[in-house]
Amino acid sequence: MVNKKTPPSIEEWLREAKADPAAAKIGMFLAHNGVVRETPKAKVRQGLDDIPPVKGMLFSYDAAKVETAITETYNLNGIFYVRAWLNEGQLEVGDDIMYVLIGGDIRPHVIDALQFLVEKIKTECVTEIEQSDC
C-alpha cells in the first residue's frame, strides 16, 4: 500500500505562481484544499442518516488523467496558472486529499475554472473508498 504524501505549502505555491511568466496577466488566485471528513458522502449528498462516520479513506488517482484535466483547465477563458497536488494511500479524517491553485484574469473565470478542475478530478481521476468501523 502507498503511504500518504506530505502536503505542499500554499504560500510557496503562490510565491512560485507570482514569479511565473504569466503572472502579469493574473488578477486573482483561488485555492482549494480538500480534506477527509468524518461525514460520509452518502449522508451529505443523498441525505442518508443511517451511515456510520468515516474513520479513514483509501485514496488513489490516475496521474495521466489529472494532467489531462489540468491541460483542459488551461484552455478555459482567462486562465493562466494551474497547479494540483493529490495525496494517495491510507488517509485519516483531517488529512489533505488535494490542493488546487488556479490563477486567472477575473473572478468569474477563476471560480469557474476551480469548479471545473475539482469536479473533473473528483469524478474522472480519483478513487476514494471511505472506511468506517462497520
Image (spheres, rainbow, N blue to C red):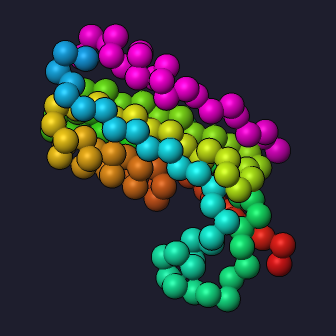
> Considering only vertical position in the picture, is 16 above or below 75?
above
**Part of the protein shown in magenta:** 1-22
Query: Residue visible at 40% across and 39% down?
Result: 31
Q: Can I make out residue 107 in this image?
A: yes
| Closer-to-camera residue (129/100) | 100
> Considering only vertical position in the picture, is 55 above or below 106?
below
Query: Residue visible at 33% across and 45% down?
Result: 114
Asked whether, in this view, residue 43 is left or right of residue 56, the answer is left
Where in the figure is residue 72, as x and y percent of width and height? Answer: 30, 39
* Residue 130 in magenta stretch: no
Query: Residue visible at 50% across and 44% down?
Result: 33
Q: Can I make out residue 64 in this image?
A: no
> Considering only vertical position in the picture, is 52 above or below 6?
below
Quadrant housing residue 49: bottom right
| Closer-to-camera residue (19/122) | 19
Where in the figure is residue 91, as x and y percent of width and height? Answer: 73, 50
Where in the figure is residue 105, as x and y percent of width and height? Answer: 16, 31
Number of numbered discs visible in the structure rendering: 0
Asked whether, in this view, residue 56 is left or right of residue 23, the answer is right
Quadrant housing residue 48: bottom right
Quadrant of the drawing holding the C terminus? bottom right
Query: Residue visible at 19% across and 15% down?
Result: 24
Quadrant of the drawing holding the N terminus? top right
Where in the figure is residue 65, as x and y percent of width and height? Answer: 47, 42
| Closer-to-camera residue (48/116) | 48
